[in-house]
Amino acid sequence: MIQKVRLALALLLLLLGMAGYAFYSTSDQFGAPLKLTDLQAYESSKQFNGQQFTNQIPTTSNASFKRGMESLSAFLFNEAQTEPSRPLEVLPVTRQTLLNPPDEMRIIWFGHSTFLMQVQEMNLLLDPMLTMTPAPHPMLGSDRYSQKIPINIEDLPAIDAVLLSHDHYDHLDYTSIIKLDPKVGHYFVPLGVGLHLQHWGISPERITELDWWQTANLGESVFTLTPARHFSGRKFENRDTTLWGGWVVESQEQRVLFTGDSGYGPHFKEIGRRFGGLDLALVETSQYNKRWPNIHMMPEQGVQAAIDAKAKVMMPIHWGAFTLSLHAWNEPPERAVAEAKRRGQAIVVPKIGEILQLSQTKQPSGWWRDY
């Protein structure tokens, strides 16, 4: 009897392993294979060393077996409130509201790092992660804190452009892209990320790939891909085979920085020097941990990054939707607001779905403390 149970368990594990390998090998969720021959087109980039992309300064993510065991132990014995006590309330946005934008730029946060930006009669989507789990399969990630998003994909108006910062699952979501694509005019992405989009059936003519500091125009707006201190990869074997970055979106009236994911580094001062100041900086200040200090910023570093970039106003991002680290879910805005006050940096923390216009910014209300 015991031998039969052992045999059944072994067979079950074998079948699960085979199913997992088949999913890993064939699912479109993982994007393009990104073989070395595919990357030869990027040999002229200063960020590409012939095999993979690199950061401006030495950067490690401490992804060793020892660090992995430490992280697992910390996860198992973590006492922080890593999720809200109840689902987050989201302010709904109607299609009619979006079809009647004001002359001034306005921005709507969807949680984490996803934004709808309306500028000069254009609709831009930044890092549209609009599904419930930031992972290749729902069983492999945490659920969204809210039960819905401000507006369903089906109700969105036409999207003139999608801007992507890098190819991680919480920023480049396969299901979101497939559902959005019939509405999307063009994609602006870092080097290599376009190969994923092409793998998913999007024509190269609708994709513009940029290196750091390169620019592209759409209408009267200018998009500049800015450096970030991070890494990339959707599979274990294709780490750093696509570039990562942030974006500066310039209209005739305003300049907005979207940092993407980034550790702290000298590139923020360089952004400040090149652009001479920003009206708003959407700054990554969450999913940090002392075990990976180089690839995500602590909230205090995020405030310093906004100061370095000469931002009039900053907004903490990369929080409010998913648990990807071990800190309390609402610790990032609390620490960022406290540091911004100490440093004299203007800061806004809108609710998910709240419409943000720079001429109507409000002091943070502390809404996250209600959960």
Image (cartoon, helix red, strand yellow):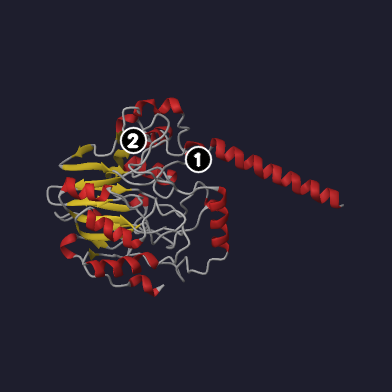
Sort mark 1 into few (<14), some (14-19) or many (20+) by Cα contacts within 10 Å: some
Mark 2 is on which residue type? Gln
Res 18 visible: yes
**Amino acid type, callout 1:** Lys
Judge whether 350 appears above or below 104 on screen. below
Query: Residue at coordinates 46% horizontally, 51% vertically from top-left?
Result: 134
Number of marks in the rendered image: 2
Compared with residue 52, is residue 259 higher up or lower down, i.e. above or below?
Answer: below
Name the foreground residue: 243 vs 145.
Answer: 243
Residue farthest along the bottom direction in this orientation: 370
Q: Residue furthest front?
A: 58
The residue located at (29%, 39%) in the rendering is 188
Disc 2 packing (10 Å; few <14; some 14–19; many ≥20): some
Tell me the quarter of the picture where residue 177 sits. Answer: top left
Of 110 and 337, which appears nearest the observer? Answer: 337
**Which circle marks residue 47 in the picture?**
2
Q: Is residue 42 above or below residue 277?
A: above
Q: Which residue is mark 1?
A: 235
At horizontal 39% and vertical 67% (from top left) the residue drawn is: 331
